[in-house]
Image (cartoon, rainbow, N blue to C red):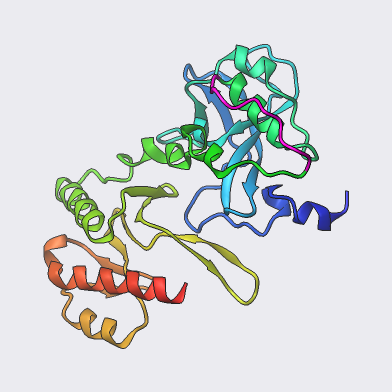
Amino acid sequence: MDKDKIKHRRLQELDNSDFEIVKGEPDIRGWDVKNAHGQKIGEVEELIVDAQQKKVRYMVVDLDDNELKLSHRKILLPIGMAELHQKDDDVILPNVTADHLSVLPVYDKNNITPDVERKICTTLGRKTETNSLLEGEEMHPEFYRHEYYNDDNLYKHRLQEVNPANDQKKKDSFRLIELMKEWSGFEPKMWGPTIIGFGAYHYKYASGHEGDMPLMGFSPRKAQFSLYVTDPSHNNKKLLEKLGKYSMGKACIYFKKLEDLNLDVLEKLSKETMQFIKKHY
């Protein structure tokens, strides 16, 4: 099929789109897919992205070599039904049964229509409107405001995993979560396996490269924290002088203990970072 036609579809395979996985976020393509009992269902072959909303909507799962005696074919599963294993590179489907998998439509990249999307959801147990759309008519945005498409579900079991064994670092991590939640007005969200982010913005460079990043966030790594709250403004540099004990990386601030930082300055720095991002993006 003509690549230009594929490029202008709303739902596209990741490989054929301009969408890029956020830096630090795992690329789950090639990962095994298992049920809640650890039985292999298949493998993630591809991700389907919404080119308009810049969101991953589905996984393409190849059922080859499964342990449930399912016929070999490829299916689509909504991204919100998947959860990453806490430690292993496995995708878990806790609420999908062999009966569901056996009757889901066969994946056809040239035929991801609203009717197919509704059929997938009703097969999995969701009640949806059954009215057919006219050819070329797009799915209403409300359709995706459902847990089946909540990509936060993918990382929810890894939130505790990123909190290190050190008790003080755990306390600092949870304190930072509460502070950044208050400063940003957003709930925490996992951005990949280690970054806890708040809010989001979309960037696009002149080169054509684009993606999504949190407005602010941090990662409690083993050696020290990585803090993502900086912008290149002159006032920011003044605030950094008063922040406390830290070192600067290329795109983040490193510190060992929260008590080493002036929290009032950190609050101002975080809020000014948000203002800078909202103004320029």
Question: Residue 270: x, y in percent?
Answer: 27, 68
Question: Residue 162: x, y in percent?
Answer: 32, 45
Q: Is residue 92 above or below residue 19?
A: above
Q: Give the range drawn in magenta.
A: 125-135
Q: Which of 143 and 245 is in front in this view?
A: 143
Please tell me whether the stretch drawn in magenta is mainly helix, strand or loop. loop
Q: Nearer the viewer, residue 215 or 133?
A: 133
Q: Is residue 135 above or below residue 217?
A: above
User: Which picture quadrant has residue 183?
Assistant: bottom left
Residue at the spot 78% in from the left edge and 40% down from the top edge: 135
Q: Please check the rendered image and state whether residue 126 is part of the magenta-colored stretch, yes or no.
A: yes
**Is any atom of residue 206 visible in this view?**
yes
User: Which picture quadrant has residue 204?
Assistant: bottom right
Question: Residue 3: x, y in percent?
Answer: 83, 55
**Is any atom of residue 250 visible in this view?**
no
Residue at the spot 45% in from the left edge and 76% down from the top edge: 280
Question: Residue 59: x, y in percent?
Answer: 62, 37
- Residue 227 left/right relative to 62: left
Outermost residue, right side? 1
Residue at the spot 52% in from the left edge and 32% down from the top edge: 91
Residue at the spot 71% in from the left edge and 36% down from the top edge: 133
